[in-house]
Amino acid sequence: MGKGRAPCCDKNQVKRGPWSPAEDLRLINFIQNYGHDNWRALPKQAGLLRCGKSCRLRWINYLRPDVKRGNFTQDEEETIIKLHKTWGNKWSKIASRLPGRTDNEIKNVWNTHLKKRLLNTATTKDCNEPKESLTTSSSSSSSLRLSNETQDLETEQPNKTNYVTSDLFCPEQQTTSSLSSNPSNSNSSSQVDKVWPQNHLDFGEEVEKKKENKQIRSELELELELESIEIPLEWDKDFWNILDLEDIDLFGSNEVDQYYCQASNFGEEKRQEFENDKWFKYLENELGLEADGCSGADDVTAAERLLMDDVDPCMAYFADGLT
DNA sequence: AACGATCTCAACCGCGTGGCT
DNA sequence: TAGCCACGCGGTTGAGATCGT
């Protein structure tokens, strides 16, 4: 055995660089069907010329259905700033508090936006009177308050009033949904994406329970509490909007509701079928592969055709793209 | 319109860690 | 207990996008 660590894979044997749509589809399809018990073995099993690490990264940072896209909200940015103050560059830990955001994304946002902004803020404030400071460790009253908040975080007791979503992520309270939405936990659920129908039901139930208390609470209180309900990411409206699903009838709320009814009747197999179909539809839409309204008598989607073993993915991709 | 500077972010790299034998 | 292996994390890179002149 030679010195140093053996490379995780043969660099000459694997493809590197940006992922093609066909590769994405192949990876998604494989994980949907077989999960990701073993990242190292996955590329071979899935027929991908990629390193296992690369597959894992691609899945976690980009392809997971619950990954949130788009700009960070004010709330999210503030949360990052606060958590960074507490934990420093523990990106995965910070990501665990931000549903749908990955450590990589948070790291990028911090390095490109927040760090600079805070530096500017600090500079500006140095020129003005000393006020509350997020960036410095000065002993102002506000930073004292902040340190109290962060203490809560350190003891895994998130401060309910300061983090819109933080109370959703207490380990004790985590549902399968939030677990699967958490990149750092992604390894613990090898069969992914099978949880959201149940979460939808839980969510509805919880809303109803909250509403029952309406008589004895002010509307404001109720609203605040509703905000704290754990909304399954897969059901997050923003998420679906981000995916530009308006054009896909399958994702209309009526159909989804219908599906829930059906799912309880037809069981796990049907549900999985629906999940796969849902993803193919989404990917076709996202990747511009969607066929025209009548996709053929055999119900094979463009994306599925890509995955057929006897079809060259790249050729199929371009062929579909041109139609 | 063209070009260089700057920014963004997906992907890579190497190391630390924990589980298994 | 030591060695191996796989995973996950954090730092870094570089291609493409955007901005400014």
Image (tube, coloured by chain):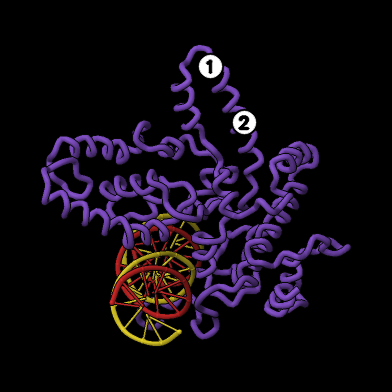
Chain colours: A purple, B yellow, C red
Q: Between marks 1 and 2, how big is the CA–CA gap?
A: 15 Å
Three-letter code, disc 1: Asn
Q: Nearer the viewer, residue B2 or A112?
A: B2
Quadrant location of the C terminus of chain A in the rendered image: bottom right
Quarter of the view holding residue A152: top left
The chain that hosts pointer 1 is: A
Residue under label 1, please give it: A213
For badge 2, the amino acid type reads Gly
Residue A303 numbered tag = none
Q: What is the x, y in percent for residue B8?
A: 40, 64
Q: Which residue is mark 2?
A: A204
Precedes in sequence: disc 1 or disc 2: 2
Task: Specify few, some or many for label 2: CA neighbours under 10 Å numbering under 14, 14-19, or 20 or more.
Answer: few
Residue at x-position 59% and y-position 33%: A203
Residue A14, above or below A128: below
Q: Quadrant of residue A177?
A: top right
Above-or-below relation of A142 to A105: above
Q: Quadrant of the N terminus of chain A?
A: bottom left
| Residue drawn at point x = 71 percent, y = 42 percent | A256
Q: Position of residue A188 (x, y in %)?
A: 53, 51
> Is A58 left, or right, of A250 in this rendering?
left
From this view, report whether residue A23 is shown above or below residue A146.
below
Instruction: In this rendered view, identify the residue nearer to me: B16 or A251.
Output: A251
Q: Residues within 10 Å of mark 1 (few under 14, many from 20)?
A: few
